[in-house]
Amino acid sequence: MASIGTYNTLKVTRETGSGYYLDGENLGEILLPGSVAPKDLRWGSAIEVFLYPDSEDRLVATTEKPVATVGEFACLEVLTVHPQHGAFLGWGLGKDLLLPFREQGEQRLDAGDRVVVYIKLDERSQRIVATTKISRYLSKSPPRYAPAQRVSFLITHRTPLGYHAIVEGSYSGLVYHSNLGIALEPGQVMEGYVQAVRPDGKIDLSLDPVGPGRFKDLADEVMDALAKSGGRLPFDDNSSPEAIRDAFASSKKAFKKALSTLYRQRRIRFPEGGGIEKI
């Protein structure tokens, strides 16, 4: 069954001067404009296309790929704001994606802003629209993640406690400021680790590995880096969180603890002028 707002593999039924008509099954014949069709497309061929209503609400097919499809979250840029309808977002297609005022809550947007949205199909109009009311579209089932499990997450917004995130496109998570040392931006897609799954189903996240072996692993990584660099590195307790994150994918807090472990083990020293040296 073909569906609007997703990718579908459909067969060509006929060719016209404006393009190719595809068998949209339950949706009827659907035009694939010649401007976005492969040159070698023929009658009877099967092709993967994205289905969406055009500016005149006619259902069309395209080989262009949007940033996200119906049922997914994404961070998109506001291109224009219409005083009656809402904000129009760029999502990789010729027709921009509407974020109606009623779907913005108290949030008001200007051109150039970036906003995290959920993309959905309006059941009444059969139009694809965006909404910032993302919490209602997160999974209600209990997360089945274990502590220290590696996950991907999308940063949505900053709070006094930390940064809210959508974990694996399904669950609510939080990265605490105390676990960071660097600023994050809404729309960033991060790789990190589950610290804990709370009773309410929300997930505490960390950018660093968790568990008793994390500092040992990082200490070993520092020693490997020292060996490859000739025994000296320009990083120490005074290095910026950003520099440490870029070099070791670690928070400054975890890095300092790893250095302390190595120093106590007499494996490194802190020379004058900064940095660390292998003993």
Image (spheres, helix red, strand yellow):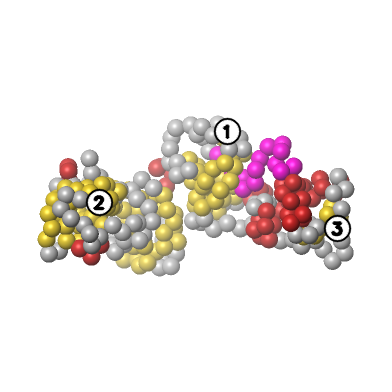
* Secondary structure of residue under mark 1: loop
The residue drawn where x is 11% and y is 61% is 16
Compared with 122, 183 (above or below) is: below
Q: Is residue 165 left or right of residue 237?
A: left
Q: Within the magenta stretch, is there residue 39? A: no
Range drawn in magenta:
203-217
- SS at mark 3 in the image: loop
Q: Residue at x 54, y 34 (%)?
A: 145
How far from the left and from the top, in percent, is residue 270? 85, 58
Mark identifier at residue 248:
none
Q: Distance between the residues labelled 1 and 2?
A: 40 Å
Please, what is the three-letter code of the amino acid marked with disc 1? Ala
Contact between marks 2 and 3 (CB within 8 A): the answer is no
- Regarding residue 191, the answer to whether it shows in the image is yes
On residue 270, the disc is 3
Upstream in sequence: badge 1 or badge 2:
2
Find residue 146 and name its label: 1
Whether residue 235 sits left or right of residue 184 in the image: it is: right
Q: Nearer the viewer, mark 1 or mark 2?
A: 2
Mark 2 vs 3, N-terminal side: 2
Is residue 198 among what the camera can see?
A: no
The label number, if any, that marks residue 47 in the structure image = 2
Amino acid of disc 2: Ile
Q: Which of 269 and 192 is in front in this view?
A: 269
Report the mark closest to the observer, 1 or 3. 3
Position of residue 267 relative to residue 239, above or below, is above
Q: Do the residues labelled 1 and 2 touch (CB within 8 Å)?
A: no
> Residue 206's x, y, as percent?
62, 45
Between the residue at mark 2 and the residue at mark 3, the CA separation in whole angstroms equals 62 Å
